[in-house]
Image: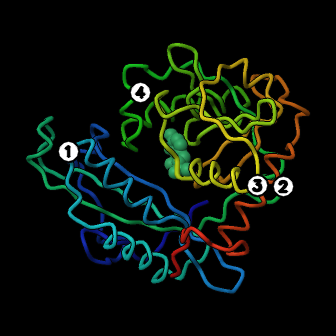
């Protein structure tokens, strides 16, 4: 359940949530022509609160908008301040922050440039999965919706309209009793899930598909590639087929909202032992230590609120 918050940031200022509604003629509402991102704040072991890799998320938001030729009009620093303010003024600790760039009204023809571009930042309480959820992970279905190969480059942008396919694939998976869906492209290569990147441990090497397969270059994916190196694991970006996933010793997903999540089974086939594997567990612990300030933040990824 998402608890509503009292204050949001819209176009440069904090506002009461009820004063920040969008008109029905809002262009993005009709065509999904907009961009968003998702960031988390974490309670720190020293009692403080910090956003994790907020600068990278806000940079990606601006780049996603630029892919759609939308000018955000706020710098990365402005957007970081907006995110901090939203967490602080709403009295949140463990929170999810959702910046959204959208095209306004009144022109609902395709000429989006006739409208103003708006930037909103929203925050709500979110502490992710329980310890049990993190340990058990979630089953996955190979989606019947293929990722179009010719649009691979466009998936680098976190554009609202991409998520039509995600919602369809997620719904299909849930209706069939699975927790998540995995996208393959039209050549049968693994891309990502509906909202996370995917990793497989193959011959003790931590592998993930390359960006060229058409996936969002996740910030958690990048974090996990770095942490795997720190922990001494072999790391490789390489194409993965569905068979590679079935025969891997471990499969897990990465994303801001869910962190690192084991995938114990795909299409009713157990992966490895069908329980969280040692590599996934080591990376999950390291990631949790990092975001909560228990592991030294040598890369400057935490921004205190
Ligand atoms: N792929 C997709 C399609 C996503 O929506 C997300 C979530 N933003 C990710 C991957 C993971 O990205 P990140 O680690 O930056 O949250």
Query: For residue 198, which numbered disc appears in the image?
Result: none
Q: Look at the numbered disc 2 and give the secondary structure of its residue.
A: helix
Q: In which quadrant will I find the N terminus?
A: bottom right
Q: Indicate which label's residue lies in the foreground, 2 or 4.
A: 4
Q: Residue at x 36, y 54 (%)?
A: 61
Distance of mark 2 from mark 4, alpha carbons?
35 Å
Distance of mark 3 from mark 4, alpha carbons?
31 Å
> Is 206 located above or below residue 2 in the figure?
above
| Mark 4 lies on residue | 152
Q: Is residue 44 left or right of residue 251?
A: left
| Mark 2 lies on residue | 132
Q: Quick one: label 3 or label 2, which is nearer the N terminus? A: 2
Image spot of residue 148 (x, y percent): 43, 20
Q: Look at the numbered disc 1 and give the secondary structure of its residue.
A: loop
| Mark 3 lies on residue | 231
Nearest to the observer: residue 11 or residue 232:
232
Q: Is residue 120 left or right of residue 282?
A: left
Distance of mark 3 from mark 1, alpha carbons?
40 Å
Q: Quadrant of residue 110?
A: top left
> Is 104 located above or below residue 244 in the figure?
below
Q: Residues within 10 Å of mark 1 (few under 14, many from 20)?
A: few
Q: Residues within 10 Å of mark 3 (few under 14, many from 20)?
A: few
């Amino acid at each position: 359940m998402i608890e509503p918050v009292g204050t949001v940031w819209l176009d440069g200022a904090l506002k009461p949530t009820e004063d920040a509604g969008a008109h029905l003629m809002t262009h993005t509402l009709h065509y999904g022509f907009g961009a968003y991102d998702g960031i988390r704040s974490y309670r720190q072991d020293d009692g403080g609160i910090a956003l994790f890799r907020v600068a990278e998320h806000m940079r990606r938001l601006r780049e996603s908008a630029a892919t759609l030729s939308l000018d955000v009009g706020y710098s990365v620093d402005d957007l970081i301040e907006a995110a901090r303010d939203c967490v602080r003024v709403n009295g949140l600790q463990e929170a999810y922050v959702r910046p959204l760039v959208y095209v306004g009204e009144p022109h609902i023809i395709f000429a989006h440039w006739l409208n103003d571009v708006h930037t909103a930042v929203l925050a709500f309480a979110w502490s992710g999965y329980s310890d049990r959820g993190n340990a058990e992970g979630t089953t996955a279905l190979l989606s019947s919706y293929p990722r179009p190969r010719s649009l691979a480059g466009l998936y680098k942008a976190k554009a609202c309209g991409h998520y039509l396919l995600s919602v369809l694939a997620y719904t299909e998976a849930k209706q069939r009793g699975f927790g998540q869906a995995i996208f393959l492209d039209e050549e049968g290569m693994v891309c990502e899930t509906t909202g996370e990147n995917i990793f497989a441990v193959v011959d003790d090497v931590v592998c993930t598909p390359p960006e060229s397969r058409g996936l969002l270059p996740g910030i958690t994916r990048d974090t996990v590639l770095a942490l795997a190196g720190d922990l001494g694991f072999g790391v490789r970006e390489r194409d993965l087929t569905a068979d590679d996933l079935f025969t891997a010793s471990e499969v897990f997903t990465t994303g801001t909202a869910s962190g690192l999540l084991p995938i114990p089974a795909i299409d009713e086939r157990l992966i490895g032992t069908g329980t969280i594997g040692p590599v996934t567990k080591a990376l999950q612990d390291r990631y949790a230590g990092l975001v909560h300030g228990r592991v030294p933040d040598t890369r400057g990824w935490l921004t205190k609120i």
